[in-house]
Amino acid sequence: MTDDRSPEYLRTLFCIGVRDTFFAAGPDERKAVFDESRRAFDDLGGRFGVRVLGTMDDDESMVGPSTGFPWTCYILADVPDYATVGRVCGIIRDHPVGDHQLWHYFTVQARVGRQLFFGNA
């Protein structure tokens, strides 16, 4: 058995939930949240050295707020170090949307581990 895991990155699953305040917002405010979310998470590779492996959004089969598992959407990425995991999570804390930050509408949790030794091909 070979071990393809590299100590050079942390396999990280960013789990993002949608809060009640998003669903209580009007159409213009929700559009602003969508637009700012795109801007906030744009170019994670260039900004943080993060290699995004995939994303998943289950908003078609999950309706309403998610404050815990199962989350609404996910970003699976290889992240250079633990401090960068915190910086990516900080996007939710720091990025503005009108008079609020994204955390007013979303919550984030990061699961940090390593690549699984099977199922990668």
Image: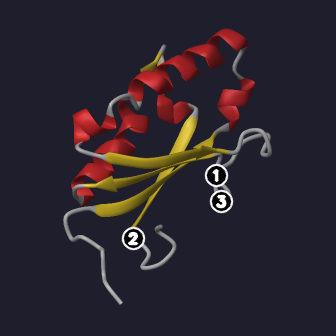
Residue 115's label in the rendered image is: 2
Mark 1 residue crowding within 10 angstroms, few (<14) / some (14–19) / many (20+): many
Residue 120 rendering spot, x and y as whole percentages:
46, 68
Instruction: List x then y, in percent, for residue 39.
Output: 41, 22
Which of the 4 image quarters holds residue 87?
A: top left
Q: Badge 3 is on which residue? A: 69
Is label 3 in a helix, a strand or a loop?
Answer: loop
Q: CA distance from mark 1 to mark 3?
A: 5 Å
Q: Secondary structure at mark 1?
A: loop
Give left or right: position of 13 versus 114.
right
Q: Foreground residue, 94 or 77? A: 77
User: Which circle, 3 or 2, is nearer the viewer?
Assistant: 2
Residue at image x 24%, y 70%? 6
The N terminus sits in image quarter: bottom left
Q: Earlier in the sequence, mark 2 or mark 1?
A: 1
Which of the 4 quarters of the picture holds residue 90? top left
Residue at the outermost top position: 28
Question: Measuring 65% from the left and 59% from the top, which residue is drawn there?
Answer: 69
Marks 3/2: CA–CA distance: 21 Å
For mark 3, does the 10 Å Cα neighbourhood hold few (<14), some (14 to 19), or many (20 or more) residues?
A: few
Percent x, y of residue 91 = 37, 36
Residue bearing mark 1: 71
Amino acid at pointer 1: Trp
Give x and y (percent) for residue 112: 39, 65
Q: Marks 3 and 1: in contact by CB < 8 Å?
A: yes
Residue at image coords 31%, 85%: 2
Between discs 3 and 2, the one toward the N terminus: 3
Please, what is the three-letter code of the amino acid marked with disc 2?
A: Gln
Tell which of 75 and 65 is nearer to you: 75
Q: What is the spatial separation of the Cα atoms under label 2 and label 1, in whole angstroms?
A: 21 Å
